Amino acid sequence: MLDQNKMSGKTNAISQAIMPDDEIDLLALFGTLWRGKWWIALCAFVGLLIGGIYATQVAVPIYSSSTVIAIEDSEPSLIDIQSAVTGVSSESESINTEIEVIRSRQLMEKVVQDLDLLSDPEFNPTLIDPGLFSLATIVELVAGPNEPDTDQELLNEAVKRLRERTSVSVKRQTFAITISVNSEGKVKSEQLANTIAENYLQDQVRVKFATLDEGVTWLSERVVELEIEIEEKDRALKDAAAEADYINIEGLELMNRQVRELRERLIGEKNDAANAAANLVQLRTAVSAQDVPLVLEATKDPTLRRISEGLSGIELWQEGGVFKTRVELLLARSETNLERARTQVSSLEETIASVEIRVDDQARKLGVIQQMSRELDTVSILYETFLTRLKETTIQQGIQSPDARVLSKAIIGEKVSPRTVRIGLLTLVLGIIAGAATVLLREMRADTFRNAEDLLSVTGEQVIGQIPLIPMEGRQDLLQYLQDKPTSAAVEAVRNLRTSILLSQLDTPPQVIMSTSTIPGEGKTTQSISLAHNLAGLGKRVLLVEGDIRRRTLDEYFLQEAGDHGILSVVSGEVSLDEAVMHSDRLNADVLMGQKSKVNAADVFSSDRFNKFLATLREAYDYIIIDTPPVLVVPDARIIGQSCDAIMYSVKWDSTSKAQVKAALKELAAVNLNVSGLVLSQVDPKGMKRYGYGERSGAYGTYGGGYYDD
């Protein structure tokens, strides 16, 4: 019977082992990658090989060649008309414009035509033979033939491809422009780069010629227009001078001086007229008042004074008298003087007005003539300037040069693609990544057991044996192999298993050992026979009992030695143990075969007669090994295990899922059964090496090669 305390402790270990762990174990991750190092190395080698083949055999080599040109710096001058139509500014916008000129469609089209790139398959895809299995051929077969491209479409495609293969850049802090062209040919890349540079320089000269030609045409037209304008203005000036009186600035100044003198004289005449008028008023007032002194004062006439001295007052103012007659004469003379003064003033005013009108007219005409003269002079100067520039421009037409020069011509192109070393390193890294991803993905998807550590960590049970896959064609070859290969790795592994089972319970060594598994095909029967053979080799009395009476697989191992009776006959008391047991010389132990029955097997193993049967076996044999059905298939193993001392649980290497094993162990733990140890069976040494476990895994490790027979 199994120790109940041990069972409860191991049950807790199982629950802890199957507890999910969300943490990433970096050491385990590194260990997984290290175990798969050969897979990673293989993927890296394959990646490197593919990269090498692609770089050297598949990829079309691309060569690059560069031409360097320098833009001549031109500082424009405000007084130089030529600078307005030629030269390249040093501003970044101008440099970038020149770059776009180099990449322009017009220039690229000229290069295509000069080098006849339409005859080159690199630039004319219609010249490439698509082959029988190309995508274009398949599309053509499905959709029908396409309409042939026109000449313009082919030219557009060639220009497009040339532009894609051309890169133009400017070096920092310089006016140097680099033209680089990638092509499939060494010489072709050189020709393309140099031709683009030459066409650019020629384009500059052509543009200059066109600009100068336009300038000459414009200047010629303008000179003719100015010449006609000069003639018209000169004729108009002469006509204006002929229509006007001869006059100049000096004559106009003389007339102005005359006006000033007349105005001064007019002022004097006006003063005289005013005085005469005042005297006349005074005289008339004195005469009206017959005031002799006032009359004498007003007239200041000495004759009138002498007359007045010899006459009295009455005599002075008598009609017809000398005094009165003289007064009337003087009064008439004053009126005449006043009239004459006024007439003189009026005459002077008319003269001044006439002279002023003439001065104004002459000044106006002189201004017009002067304006026309200035305009004529201006047009004449402009005419001379344009005529001079026309002569200079006409001379410059034959000596034009580009505003750039070639600093460095392109040479035979250097290979830039494919870069073998870079591709090799890249594919090597990709291969390593792919290999690591494959190993990790396979490890993540793996739900089986590949080593004892994995089995222990998942189940919490001790792994007591790792049995390599025994090379045999059929089950009947097992016993022959055990006899012929006593020092093979498999037999040595069974010996280790035997030692582990016998030492699993030092106080009460197990006598009845049950061999079971999770599902069929995990090698539990092979382990049972191998263990029985090994125990018999110790000189012990060993009985192999077939507890799997539903399938009866022992018949395939002992085909010629099987008897008519089996375990059911003995348990039921139909025959004695000695009558039912057969002895196998090859096994060197007794064998009790299974036996089909209509009675349910679980009922048989649960009966008291089965317990008495086991008690009888304990007395007759040193070791009894019972081969039972898988745990997840039928309940027989859980029933038989109640009467056994040890349970040997086989798990097939890289086959049985972890979930199935954990479920089976839970089934056993549910009935207070716990295995004495797990056996990793049918281990494939080559598979272990592929997974990276071959260096440290028991009897199939590489270090054990010298100790075991093949």
Image (tube, helix red, strand yellow):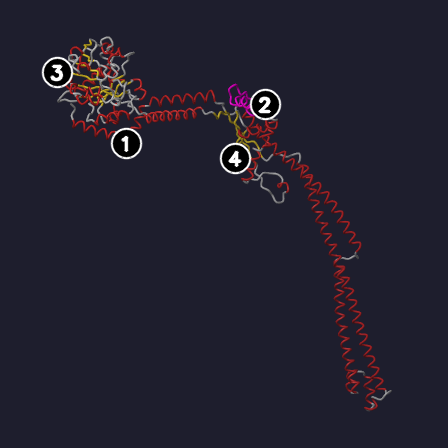
**Kind of residue at badge 2:** Ser
> Furthest residue to the right?
320
- Tell me where residue 228 sits by quadrant: top right
Q: Is residue 107 above or below residue 371?
A: above
Q: Position of residue 625 (x, y in %)?
A: 19, 17
Quadrant of residue 587 within the rendered picture: top left
Mark sitting on residue 478? none
118 part of magenta stretch: no
Label 1 Cα neighbours within 10 Å, binned few <14 / some 14-19 / many ≥20? few
Is-magenta flag for residue 136? yes
Q: Which residue is mark 2?
A: 119
Ranked by sequence position, the earlier of labels 1 and 4 is 1
N-term-proximal mark, 2 vs 3: 2
Residue type, label 3: Glu
Q: Are marks 2 and 3 in contact (CB under 8 Å)?
A: no
Q: Nearer the viewer, mark 4 or mark 2?
A: 2
Label 1 and label 2: CA atoms lie apart by 69 Å
On residue 170, which mark appears?
Answer: 4
**Of marks 1 and 3, which one's residue comes earlier in the chain?**
1
- Real-space CA distance between mark 4 and mark 3, rounded to the nearest whole angstrom: 102 Å
